[in-house]
Image (cartoon, helix red, strand yellow):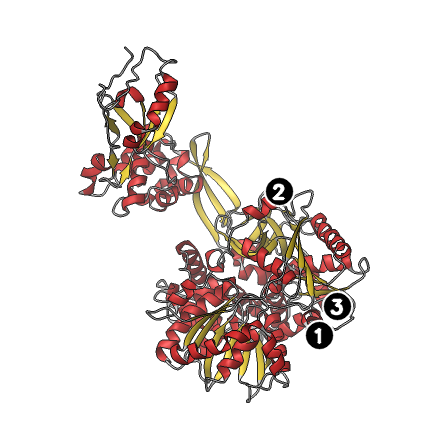
Amino acid sequence: MFLRPHLARELPFAAATDDLAAAVRESRVAVVEAPPGTGKTTLAPPILADIVSGRVVVTQPRRIAVRAAARRLAALTDTAVGEQIGFTVRGERAVGPQTRIEMVTPGVLLRRLLADPELSGVGAVILDEVHERGLDTDLLVGVLQEVRQLREDLVLVLMSATADVAGLAELIGEGHRAPVIGVDAETHPLTERWAPPDSHPLDSRGVRPEFLEHVAQTTRRALRENPEGDALVFLPGVREVRRVAEALTGSVEAEVLQLHGQIKAREQDRAVGERRALAKRRVVVSTALAESSLTVDGVRIVVDAGLSREPRRDAVRAMSGLITVRCARSSADQRAGRAARQGPGVVWRCYDEATYATLRAQVTPEVASADLTSALLSLARWGSPRGEGLALPTPLPPAAVAYGEAVLRSLEAVDAEGRITERGDRLAGLPLSPRWGRALLDGAPLVGSRRAAEVVACAELDLVRAEPDLLKTITALRRGAPDAQRWEREVGRLQRLVRAEPDNDTGAGIVIALAYPERIARRVGDTYLFASGTRAAAPAELAGHEWLAVADVARVAGAQGQGTGASIRAAAPIDRDTALVIGAFTEEVRGSLTGGRLLARRVQAIGAIELSATPIPAAALGAAAVEDVVRREGLEVIGWSEQADALRRRLAMLHRHLGEPWPDVSDEALLGRLDTWLTSDLASAADTGRLTSIDLLEPLRRLLPWPEASSLEELVPQRLQVPSGTRVRLDYPRVGADGPAVCAVRLQEIFGLTESPSILGGRVRLQFHLLSPARRPVAITDDLASFWAGPYAQVRAEMRGRYPKHAWPEDPLSAPAVRRGR
């Protein structure tokens, strides 16, 4: 494919084009590693287009990067977007019959694969920016490998901006290591400046306004002290970008531009286009997409807030969404590197060196922390429930899979085995997450297609945080607020998917409740109690309503003084009747614990929200209700006796080192299988009304496997007989800790013991805490032979004068062990 020769030659990746072409022709698969700004996104697609017969599909993790890459490549081929070079993002498509290269988001390609598993007409797929570890990109890695088993002609290339690609090359190499094509970027000197704020950058609502002003002030200072080049400012989200850009406009002698996914294409071009000679200095205020997805020309100054917005699933509070956290060190380094791409540069970090040192090394894979509900629905439709059989870069976490499948079952989207249902197939065909797809389908007949589409469009476009009261957000969008055009396009697209009347102008809360019935919330005191049991604070704009349907709630990682730990960011009011109809209304006997005594009540409730409660005798609880109390409060409400705790620690070490059949005795595991070891004792507690009367030693013994239980004392003995004749109790690490088993003994009692004893059949050596006659530690070792040969001499020299009545022989190996002094 024809590119302007001089532009192609100027890009560093031009040196690797022949290697890439050779690798693709020979192996049909390759991994490309090249830093941001080297031109891999510009040059690799045309190379593949010259080799394969079908279309080359290239994924970019963000819509703005998709459009920018398509426009740049079209310009380099002297064609219009939609001719040889096209793109497809949600709600927008520019592709023609002559299109050879198509830029798409990972989500678009994943949905296309679900509709056409053979990927007809496509000759090659390039997954770009795989180092960002987006969930859809990770899924595509696994799915495309299955496609390649059916289509040997399909070329697959993974491109990364970091050097950690060895694992990817092994993963997609089909038994051998895929070729790795690398190129180094030209580097220039980079100066680091540290500009930490006076206080923490986050609070319970997100990024503090004071910190945003600090970033603006740091940018002004950076421009004053560095008179050459443009500035690139990194912030975690659109709201922060807008506020800092507004603060800088008019206060700096430079053109202030925003760069994020919600600006118009013309404004994007101004931010990422080639810098004009003699033009006014620019300050580009950007989200993380400028780390690697886009190159901003002319940048010599980077101001880094040190924050990123990442998906998180809070299993305890049943919350998921984007939260603001400290960025990874790899991200911080990529951002800083943008200042030295085209010449000497300077990075101003809005944090200190100690904070930088504590940053996690790499970006957390989205699969490890995000809500997997949408991904699981896609995998079910692909025919690989739970991702079984797929070679994924990171396995799906079992706890997140269990939670996501429970949600899908509640939506009737999958069956008990995780296989997709007819309703699930319809939800998977919508360009929405399963929850908001359900809200659109079921909400339209109740409130009308227009109102349902308005609410869902706000959620899917992440506009719900503009105003805590979602009704006010929708009103502002109707009147032409920022993002109104984008919102109206999405509303129209969604409205065409469902046709229903009448249009209920007060039904926003109904639509939200259909998406998140567990987020139906009732005011209790100064906070709101969710049906899920979560408590959250509400802003003043919402606090006057008794009932809310909550669209967005989050906990801000690293925030100070969070109170309840959760904050409602967007919601709409509902009434009690709506809560009763949509929420999970129950009438049941519930138990509670007060002062160690079990109390019973007959409760009418919506999840954790109690509507009425009548006291009844505790004997009416039964074992199941008492189990519910223990699961809710934890095993500490019963308490561990000294003997029970000792056995539990021994079993924990057996499970950690030997695995099954030795049982997992963590709190989570024990609470998850109460029926196998504690049910009868809980039934007795229901009769007596007291849980503290239970001794957990005997119930815990019920978990011992047979016949392996006969070797318990041999593998993890309670005591060790030392040369003095004393049977010393061994101290095993607490459950969940990864420490050694410890024998704390006075040094004189182990004279003559030449080798450190082992447990677990010789797999683990005991650690000795050697004590003075006053039972204070003088040495710690798990290698007695080395201790006697070396450190003992120094211990002897220090202790002889302090404890003259006790033995300190020159040769401890031949001296008799003694319990007391001479």
Please give the name of the residue rendered at 58% of the width and 68% of the height, measured from the top-left corner: 62
x, y percent for residue 51: 46, 84
Asked where in the image residue 551 lies, by quadrant, the reply is: bottom right
Sooner in the amino-acid sequence: mark 2 or mark 3: 3
In this orientation, does residue 385 appear?
A: yes
Q: Nearer the viewer, mark 2 or mark 1?
A: 1
Please give the name of the residue rendered at 69% of the width and 49% of the height, measured from the top-left corner: 211
Q: Which residue is mark 2?
A: 560
Which residue is situated farthest in the bottom direction here? 97
Disc on res. 720: none
x, y percent for residue 489: 65, 74
Q: Which amino acid is tagged 2?
A: Gln
Q: Which amino acid is tagged 1?
A: Arg
Q: Which residue is mark 1?
A: 266
**Is residue 677 found left or right of 248 in the rendered image?**
left
Please give the name of the residue rendered at 41% of the width and 54% of the height, measured from the top-left corner: 399
Q: Which residue is mark 3?
A: 479
Label 1 neighbour load within 10 Å: few <14, some 14-19, many 20+: few
Please name whichever residue, 25 or 523, is drawn nearer the observer in this view of the structure. 25
Decide: is 313 above or below 416: above
Q: Which amino acid is tagged 3?
A: Arg
